[in-house]
Amino acid sequence: MSISRRQFIQLMGIAGAAGMLPGCGGGKQAAKKPSDLYEIPKTGNVTFMHITDTHAQLNPVYFREPNVNLGLGDAYGRPPHIVGDKLLDYYGIPKGSIEAHAFTYLNFVEAAEKYGKVGGFSHLQTFIKQMRASHGDNNTLLVDGGDTWQGSATAYYTRGQDMVGATNLLGVDVMTGHWEYTYLDHEVIKNVKDFKGDFVAQNVFVKDVASFDYKFEDFVGYNPDSLRAFKPYTIKEMGDGIRVAVIGQAFPYTPIANPSRFIPDWTFGINDEAMQSVVDEVRENEKPDVVVVISHNGMDVDLKMASRVSGIDCIFGGHTHDGMPAPSIVKNKGGETLVTNAGSNGKFVGVMQFDVRGGKVRGYDYRLVPIFSNYIEPDKEMAEYIEGVRKPYIDELTEELAVAEELLYRRGNFNGTFDQVICDAQREVGDAQISLSPGFRWGTSVLPGQSITMDHVMDQTCTTYPETYVREMSGADIKLILEDVADNLFNEDPYYQQGGDMVRVGGMDYTIDPTAGFNKRISDMTLDNGTKIEANKKYKVAGWATVGSKAPGRPIWEIVADYLRVQKTVKIDKLNTPVIKNVEGNPGIDDYVKG
């Protein structure tokens, strides 16, 4: 896709500002009042609405953006690795505005109390219906980047069926997946079959051995010739005869980052060559006017893929939960590809309008729209559906376990305060010296003075492999775990990253140098009392969410709930965040305090 210099300058919003990315709202001035966010004039003839990583949050939530999202190498100072005031300056977003609250962690508690919660499927439904009415139902597509059928208690209890129903009611046209694959394989197949839209994933294949005896009669999209487990793409006929191709890219590291024992017969991967082959096949055989990818790669991986695969007009990205106000423009041998990422937890809807003429995309307008539930009326039908889904579990989910005396949050490269609660609970209940907790990016926030309910605990912990353990580990083993996760997070080659953040720790401190090489990033490991952790000494360690074999202990949410019921109030005495070396001046870190 080519854009003229004149169009490019217009997108910047400031004459002569070539080299800067467009500001919030695709280069237009920031909204002066909240209602302005939802007045989106029709500027093209094809409109994509993109949601991703909603993590089964049917109701509105609070969600704090990170103050640490470090980028190294080519990612230094490049979206999504910009936080706080630097992000506002980069995109030209006014400080103190409602957009500043949406896109950054700044003054979070004060702004959250002012503007209220975000997301909620009944509020999403109202906005999406409004967009379809104003832009034309036959000119709009709703695409979902995955991580939708997991993340809440009701999703866990219904094995994702509650979210299949919600996405059907929302009218999702096309989606791909990641945590969708963390149910058992036959449950995944049932969910895909019950989903009324198209589930696409060009990079998921059935293993050769499994293809001989696997039961595929109910397997929507399976191709015995290519061994693709799901449809690689779908073609949608839009208004004015415009043909749109939507290709799916599922999370490539699913069997590594999540238990492969649940889906033993499927393989995943980035598969640039396969993606290029699909794009070429679609371009040649289907003659589309627009080719887009809904991806769960993570933004850094999408940026690299966009530079290596040509013929894609736009990648609608997910997985890394990066709410980016404007697309990144990536050059490749075929021209340019736009790369977006639409945040998480139902907080945003990405709205991309294409001007399609003569079989090509001639221009675009993009904005990432924050969904503030106080300013959007809930859709009655969706609200009734959500109430019905939650009704069998409502007494359990609304139990008030304790009261937060400070902001509890997760998102960020290192320990968040709710992560610390989980780690402290494991140490207390398991009588352990050290605790470990996965660096998941999903999990909602709790404001000071707010009751911590079982809903909140499940939002933070609800996986299909929640079992806990307490075991002895050597200091060398603990360091190896930290080094391995650090390499996943800070490897300068995005294709060696798997998303997520640093493993959370309790009862210990350490120093990390993100700029160092493998096995050289972690040093100065000590217990909370200052005692040095020795490589050959054994320590009692509590943890959960083992990817390999199933752990023997109770589900983590039971551990955390027991702990909170005893505590009554929660204020973090010590936040086990590491000392970070060699990141001075990095725009991906702000207001960082060593715990």
Image (cartoon, helix red, strand yellow):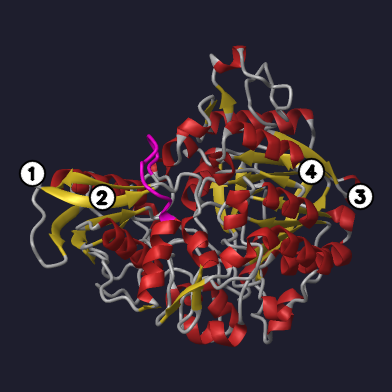
The magenta span reads 546-556
Whichever of callouts 4 and 1 sits on the residue coming sooner in the sequence is 4
Secondary structure, mark 4, is loop
Crowd rating for badge 3 (residues with CA inside 10 Å; few <14, some 14–19, many 20+): few
User: Mark 3 and mark 1 in contact (Cβ < 8 Å)?
Assistant: no
Picture layout, residue 87 above or below residue 112: above
- Name the amino acid type tagged 4: Lys
- Using a 10 Å C-alpha cutoff, classify the residue at mark 4 as few (fewer than 14 neighbours), some (14 to 19) or many (20 or more): some
Q: Amino acid at mark 1?
A: Asn
Q: Amino acid at mark 3?
A: Asp
Q: Earlier in the sequence, mark 4 or mark 3?
A: 4
Residue that badge 3 annotates: 240
The residues bearing labels 1 and 2 have C-alpha atoms spaced at a distance of: 16 Å
* Label 2 to label 3: alpha-carbon separation: 54 Å
Q: Residue furthest top?
A: 212
Q: CA distance from mark 4 to mark 1?
A: 55 Å
User: How many marks overall?
Assistant: 4
Q: Earlier in the sequence, mark 2 or mark 4?
A: 4
Q: CA distance from mark 2 to mark 4?
A: 42 Å
Q: Is residue 4 magenta?
A: no
Residues under numbered marks 4 and 3 in contact, where contact means CB atoms less than 8 Å apart? no
Q: Earlier in the sequence, mark 2 or mark 3?
A: 3
Tag 2 residue:
482
Q: Earlier in the sequence, mark 1 or mark 2?
A: 2
Q: CA distance from mark 1 to mark 3?
A: 70 Å
Q: Can you tell which mark lies on residue 196?
A: 4
